[in-house]
Structure formats: C-alpha cells, structure tokens
C-alpha cells in the first residue's frame, strides 16, 4: 500500500493487463478449476463461440484494432416500439411482448394488501379446521 503524500506510480503492465481482460482470464481459469458448472453457466456464450481464457487477449486486440480503424460510434436504429401501461404494472409493447413492472404503492394500499393476505390465510385455516371436524 502507498503512504500518504507519496505520488502514485503508474504501472503500465497492470494497465495493459486490465485492458486486455486479464482479470476475466483469471476468473475464467479459477471457475473452470473450482466449479465447472458455474463456469459453463457464466461463460456459455464464450464456450459457444469456442473462446477460452487463452484467446481472450486476442479477442480484445481484434476489438481494439476495429475501433482504431473506425472510431466513430454509430447509433443503432430505433425500433419504434410503443409501450402501453396496463393495470397491475403490466406493460405491453407494440411488438406483442409483455412485461411486468413493479410500481410503488401507497401505505393504504400496502395495508389493504396485507389485510387481504391475512384474511385469506384465516379463511384457509378455518376451512382446514372445518374439514378436520367432519
């Protein structure tokens, strides 16, 4: 660790290691050894593309070369989707996909929701008690 007041030293090798995904390579190696199923889950797209920890630096080098060739960022075309908000946080897009979004509810709504759950649980217990009596 550095002492206060000292100037920090620039470590070019450590910087290069980060740029070329050294920490990802280390993580891939560690996971492959310790937990192969988790490795397959985390890096499934890398595995499908036949990309292992040895090919990472090459992949990053190719990406940097492509960026150097054409550094202008091109925005992706907008899909022009419209969103319709429904009841209970249901959002439907114009392409037909549906998503549920959670919205904040008021204190009264939260208390009513809890009261309804308690009433449902009590009704279930009463029905179970009635079934036992018979």
Image (spheres, rainbow, N blue to C red):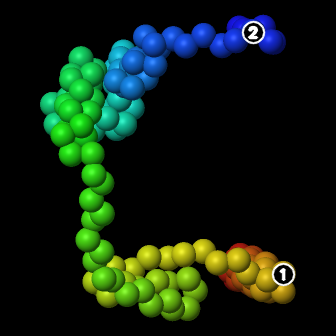
Using a 10 Å C-alpha cutoff, classify the residue at mark 1 as few (fewer than 14 neighbours), some (14 to 19) or many (20 or more).
few
Left or right of 97? Residue 83 is right
Instruction: Specify the label residue 61 is tagged with.
Output: none
Which residue is found at the position 84% from the left and 81% from the top? Answer: 107
Numbered-mark total: 2
Which residue is found at the position 39% from the left and 18% from the top? Answer: 16
110 versus 4 height, above or below:
below
Residue 88: image quadrant is bottom right
- SS class of the residue under badge 2? loop
Question: Which corner quadrant holds the C terminus?
Answer: bottom right
Pick the front one: 63 or 94: 63
Q: Do the residues labelled 1 and 2 touch (CB within 8 Å)?
A: no
Residue 98 at x, y percent in the picture: 39, 80
Question: How far is the residue under mark 1 from the one under mark 2?
Answer: 53 Å
Residue 28 at x, y percent in the picture: 36, 23
Residue 54: image quadrant is top left
19 versus 126 height, above or below:
above
Pick the front one: 82 or 132: 82
Instruction: Specify the label residue 6 is tagged with.
Output: 2
- SS class of the residue under badge 1? helix
Which residue is found at the position 24% from the left and 27% from the top? Answer: 61
Pick the front one: 105 or 56: 56
Using a 10 Å C-alpha cutoff, classify the residue at mark 2 as few (fewer than 14 neighbours), some (14 to 19) or many (20 or more).
few
Which of the two labelled residues, at mark 1 and mark 2, occupies the earlier sequence position? 2
Q: Residue beneath label 1, please?
A: 107
Residue 92: image quadrant is bottom left
Residue 31 at x, y percent in the picture: 40, 22
Pick the front one: 39 or 69: 69
Residue 27 at x, y percent in the picture: 42, 22
**Residue 86 seen in this snapshot:** yes
**Residue 28 seen in this snapshot:** no
């Amino acid at each position: 660790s550095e002492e206060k007041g000292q100037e920090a030293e620039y470590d070019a090798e450590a910087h290069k290691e980060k740029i070329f995904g050294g920490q990802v390579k280390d993580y891939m190696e560690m996971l492959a050894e310790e937990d192969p199923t988790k490795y397959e889950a985390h890096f499934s797209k890398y595995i499908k593309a036949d990309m292992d920890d040895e090919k990472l630096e090459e992949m990053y080098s190719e990406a940097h070369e492509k960026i150097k060739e054409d550094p202008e960022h091109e925005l992706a075309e907008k899909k022009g989707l419209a969103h319709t908000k429904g009841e209970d946080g249901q959002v439907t897009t114009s392409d037909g996909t549906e998503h549920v979004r959670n919205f904040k509810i008021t204190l009264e709504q939260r208390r009513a929701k809890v009261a309804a759950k308690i009433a449902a649980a009590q009704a279930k217990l009463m029905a179970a008690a009635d079934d036992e009596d018979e």
